[in-house]
Amino acid sequence: MSQVAGCVFCAILRGELPSTEVLSTTRTYAFRDINPGAPTHVLVIPRQHITDAAAIEDDHGEVLAELFVTAQRVAEAEGLAERGYRLVFNVGQDSGNSVPHLHLHLLGGRVMAWPPG
Ligand code: 5GP
Ligand code: ZN
């Protein structure tokens, strides 16, 4: 599904790189972050390669809805739905974005500071 050569998350989707699956759906995949910033740190990605939140277009509605529903299901499965959690998209250099394949961070299991550093 429109994957990009050289993209680390597309390689994970193709099974060429290992990952720890949390949830898999038709249009999305959720897996544990390799360098967790909280007791639960899951990345939810579209199977379709979208570079980042700044590259979202009008016809991405369906995949984006599925991305958020997957995040809700992950939060439920991780026992976070009641206590709460944080959802983050980093965009661009100042945010620290490092992987150019759209990914929704789901962080939880500890109290979060605001604003983030
Ligand atoms: P960003 O900084 O781009 O918003 O987040 C990228 C995230 O991807 C980081 O939290 C980083 O730890 C994670 N990450 C980078 N490469 C890999 C990988 O190969 N496997 C997994 N599971 N996570 C990765
Ligand atoms: Zn990709």
Image (cartoon, grey):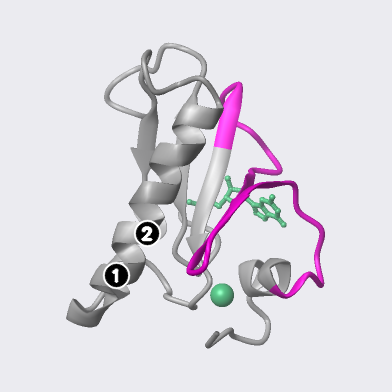
- Kindly identify which residue carries mark 2: 66
| Residue type at numbered disc 1 | Glu
Residue at figure coordinates x 36%, y 15% from the top left? 82
| Residue type at numbered disc 2 | Glu
Q: For the residue carrying disc 2, how many other residues have a C-alpha within 10 Å: few (<14), some (14-19), or many (20+)?
A: some
- Kindly identify which residue carries mark 1: 62
Pick whichever, 28 or 52, lies toward us.
28
Q: Secondary structure at mark 2?
A: helix
Residue at figure coordinates x 45%, y 39% from the top left? 73
Q: Quadrant of the C terminus?
A: top left
Is 94 colored magenta in this rendering?
no
Pointers 1 and 2 in contact (C-beta within 8 Å): yes
Is 16 colored magenta in this rendering?
yes
Relative height, residue 20 to residue 14 (above, below): above
State the CA–CA distance, disc 1 to disc 2: 6 Å
Quarter of the figure with residue 5 = bottom right
Q: Residues in magenta?
A: 14-41
Report the number of numbered marks: 2
Q: Percent position (x, y) of residue 99?
A: 55, 63
